[in-house]
Image: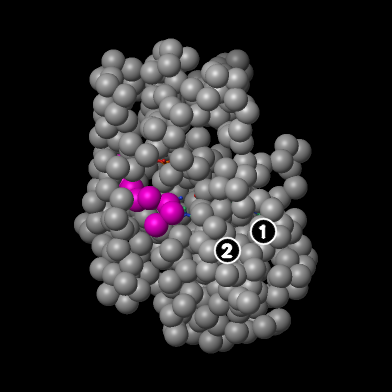
Amino acid sequence: MKRALITGITGQDGPYLAQLLLHKGYKVFGTYRRVSTPNFWRLQDLGIVKQVTLIPADLSDMSSLLEAVTISDPQEIYNLAAQSFVGSSFDQPLFTTDIDASGSTRFLEIIRHLKKDIRFYQASTSELYGASSEIPQHEQTPMIPNSPYAAAKLHSFHMCRIYRHSYGIQASNGILFNHESPLRGLEFVTRKITNSVAKIKLGLQKNLPLGNLSPQRDWGYAPEYVKAMWLMMQQPKADDYIIATGETHAVSEFAQEAFAAVGLNWKDYVLSDKRLHRPLDVHQLCGSPQKAETVLGWKPKVTFNELVKIMVAADLKRWKMFLDGKAFPWDAPNHSHEMDIIARNVTKDAYREAGYKKKGLKERFF
Ligand code: NDP
Ligand code: GDP
């Protein structure tokens, strides 16, 4: 029986990947962080929480990673754990670097010293292309990160390549473009929109503040993308692959489709809030999945419109069940209102209270 270790099994991709591997007959181990409130809702949602072996570990703690690898004794490690939200990486650049850059190197070192034939999947990202103007992006497109998140992930991307060439370690980078699902975190724009659309439709929310509506993303469906991760690990030689749909849509288009799915006009509800703009954004992402198609035989099926409808339907169903008094694993009811918690909002007030009106700060915060 094959054994796999998945880091970040409590996130969006981890449970879908675990489900796929279980289906393929793997023994699946997953790392989770000890937190004051357990967050296994996604594994529970897929009904697989009892089928995976959970190991407490943190990417900042080498000894916990060593223990996770020793206990699981895997043939394949899927390193999905990350501080994965670009917005937060501007607020916590050093933490993001420790987890998203050094975290993967910790694993590569463990593999180098412990067992060189463990195959390693690194969750790389389309954000690596950041300021690149080439459309569509392919594996040779120059990588110009536009956020601390992307810079940290670029470090990991190169470390995989370097360990592959230096030590013959089977480390592959999956350069995945944005992929979404009903299990997506509520801070990401797609799920923020579909959750709000459901609440607005049911009279639980009045409007939806968003940041920059013009950036374009290549949005795919997460359950299809985890299959590509597995396919990469089955190749005779490690390599780097873009996983994308080849289509790109603006944030405004996502909002328009999501509201239309429940018969509403997005323009009646979406507000533009400058506080939700990023210090630096990525304007357009659109990936070419050609190499993945040719080498891995991987092709996306779910279209943009289908993806939006899947997510809206899931959130609407959840809020209706909630109103009917049903209990089920879920994240949204306990989620704080974003405008109450964003760091830039707090910082703005703090600066204002201190009477701080320096030009640069004024431009950013006021
Ligand atoms: P999520 O944010 O949903 O999940 C991230 C996971 O990492 C969670 O399980 C989280 O644990 C865990 N984690 C965070 N910090 C640490 C840490 N210090 N130690 C151990 N675990 C930690 O991300 P996704 O599932 O969406 O994405 C999976 C990976 O793919 C990430 O690396 C992401 O950056 C990358 N990626 C994602 C894309 C997407 O569109 N989804 C696109 C391209 C790349 P906890 O639940 O406790 O917070
Ligand atoms: P990212 O591509 O990994 O940064 O995924 P996100 O879903 O966080 O953001 C996608 C795009 O939506 C970015 O260009 C954001 O600036 C833009 N965006 C606009 N409004 C919002 C918002 O309210 N929340 C988030 N998360 N993104 C927003």
Q: Residues within 10 Å of mark 1 (few under 14, many from 20)?
A: many
Q: Is residue 58 magenta?
A: no
Residues at marks 1 and 2, CA–CA distance in whole angstroms: 8 Å
Q: Nearer the viewer, residue 184 or 141?
A: 184
Circle number at residue 144: none
The picture quadrant where one finds residue 27 is: bottom right
For disc 1, the marked residue is: 52
The picture quadrant where one finds residue 313 is: top left
Q: Amino acid at mark 1?
A: Val
From the top left corner, tell me how far across and down residue 290 is, in percent.
Answer: 25, 68
The reply to whether dot 1 and dot 2 touch (C-beta < 8 Å) is: yes
Indicate the quadrant containing the C terminus: top left, top right, bottom left or bottom right. top left
> Is residue 286 placed above or below 354 in the rendered structure?
below
From the top left corner, tell me how far across and down residue 354 is, in percent.
Answer: 61, 18
Q: Amino acid at mark 2?
A: Leu
Mark 1 within 8 Å of ligand 1, using the beta carbon: no
Q: Residue sitting at 37 percent across and 69 percent down?
A: 241
For disc 2, the marked residue is: 22
Q: Residues within 10 Å of mark 2 (few under 14, many from 20)?
A: some
Indicate the quadrant containing the N terminus: top left, top right, bottom left or bottom right. bottom right
Q: Is residue 221 magenta?
A: yes
Q: Residue sitting at 43 percent across and 44 percent down?
A: 181
